[in-house]
Amino acid sequence: MADGEGLAARVEDVHEIAAGMPHVTVENGTGDNPVYQVGRKSFVFFRNPRPDAVDAVTGERLTDVIVFWVPTEADKQALVQDEGSPFFTTAHFNGHLSVLVRASRIGELSRAELAEVIQDAWLSQASARRAATWLACR
């Protein structure tokens, strides 16, 4: 299979794919968590434990949440409403075009699925010119 289509995604793939998109910079967020940006706009970041994202059983704050921007509210809803999907959201992200996934569940996605989510995140934040150039090269 080309480009790891059937391989389970890994956290390392998040870094590799996000950093491999054009014009990407990596900033250090709170706690030195990586924040991937295009044109100074974040499109993927690793979130610090927050009170809105907790383990349903223990009540402990989740320490492995990754945030991905999405192009539209419809895209967000499609990802979070699919019961088989590892994506979720919290009230904190109401009205924000992003979805969350725990790093511990990233392997439920194939590398190809993860790449599509990251590419869509990048496209949602890149300038129209950069997005058109990238799409034209594909």
Image (tube, grey):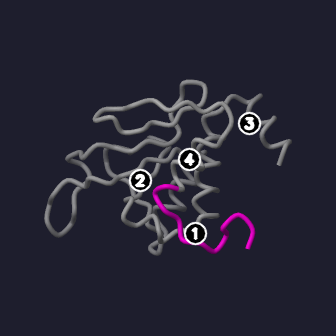
Left or right relative to 43: residue 45: left
Residue occupying the point 43% across, 66% down: 86
Marks 2 and 4, the one that precedes in the sequence: 4
Crowding near the residue tagged with mark 4, few <14, some 14–19, many ≥20 C-alpha atoms within 10 Å: many
| Vertical position of residue 40 compared to residue 53: above or below | above
What's under tag 1, amino acid-wise? Ser
In magenta, the rendered stretch is 1-12
What residue is shown with label 2? 100
Residue 131 shows which numbered tag?
A: 3
What residue is shown with label 1? 110
Mark 2 and mark 4: Cα distance apart in space: 10 Å
- Residue 14 placement (x, y as % from top left): 52, 52
- Residue 85 placement (x, y as % from top left): 47, 69
Marks 3 and 1, the one that precedes in the sequence: 1
Q: Secondary structure at mark 3?
A: helix
Q: Secondary structure at mark 4?
A: loop
| Tags 1 and 2 touching, CB below 8 Å | no
| Tags 3 and 1 touching, CB below 8 Å | no
What residue is shown with label 4? 70
Q: Nearer the viewer, residue 84 or 16?
A: 16
Please name which of the two marks, 3 or 1, marks the residue nearer to the observer. 1
- Would you say residue 3 sits in the magenta stretch? yes
Marks 1 and 2, the one that precedes in the sequence: 2
What's under tag 2, amino acid-wise? Leu
Residue occupying the point 85% across, 42% down: 136
Mark 1 and mark 4: Cα distance apart in space: 18 Å
